[in-house]
Amino acid sequence: MAACIFVIALAFAAVPLFAQMVASHDLTLGWRAPSEHISVPETCTQSGSSIANDGSGNPADVGSEATRLQLTITGISPSPLEIGNDFIAKVQLKNVGTTTILVPSSADGERVLRVSVDSAAEQYEVGDVSFRLLTGKDRRTPVFLNTSGALFADPEDKSSYLPLEPGNWIEIKEEGLVECGLEDCLGEIHPDNKAEITAWWYQRVLSHRINGCNETHGSAKVREADSAPFAVAVRNRPAKSAKSAPKK
């Protein structure tokens, strides 16, 4: 009996006592991505540009059970969604790991952009939520929707992050458009009373470096999370009701 009580006590001890929502970000009210502040010298007659995938921003952190995030769609409006019209989505980003996770906390990326002293490099961290919609009979190819909103941080300034303790979560509200947000869409959006929408959180460090007359843009993944499917209905928009959402 004593052993049983001890096991139960350990189980309760593993659960955070003060799990709660610690922040709410309404990105429909506005957000700003950083501009590039460095460029190749004007004296360069020829310049080169390349893209580098830097791999993981924190190799010991990516995919770790101790730093897992859980993404949940908590609401989509209007209902049903209308093809070609905008929508508002609410998601919950929860720390379901066992250690504190740092999440970008500023909607103004320009304020946290880090430029090196010699103006040869700049970087910032960004986390955003994108949405994928599955409609039609086969539901094999999701359509990445056009979404708007992101959170930013300075990788060298911990105060620009929100420390998300185990069990705690943040709420994010953002705007999207029921249309493909990619240049090359592999799928189509069809009216569907049993469609499914999923969300994807992607957090990475973006960098821009100048080396002589060459520049390199880099991306280093920090962490990501996928949500479970959220049931929605999708229909064609009524005539004369089309409107556009801000491009991402």
Image (cartoon, grey):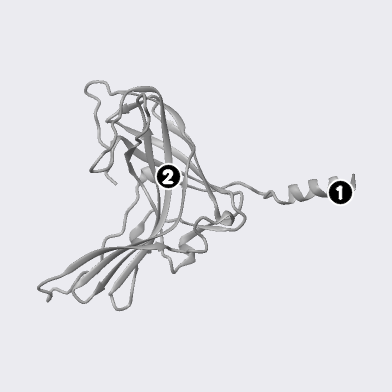
Q: What amino acid type is highlighted by mark number 2?
A: Trp
**Of residues 116 and 57, which is closer to you in this image?**
57
Rendered view: 94 above or below 110: above
Where residue 12 appears, x then y in whole percent?
74, 47
Which residue is rendered at x = 37% and y = 38% of the image?
132
Query: Would you say 247 lies left or right of 155 here?
Result: left
In what element is the residue under mark 1? helix
- Which residue is under mark 2? 200
Outermost residue to the bottom: 118
Which residue is rendered at x = 89% and y = 48% of the image?
2
**Of residues 220 and 75, which is closer to you in this image?**
220
Where residue 162 appears, x then y in whole percent?
51, 57
Which residue is rendered at x = 24% and y = 28% of the image?
242
Which one is earlier in the sequence, the residue at label 1 or at label 2?
1
In what element is the residue under mark 2? strand
Which residue is rendered at x = 13% and y = 73% of the image?
42
- Which residue is under mark 1? 3
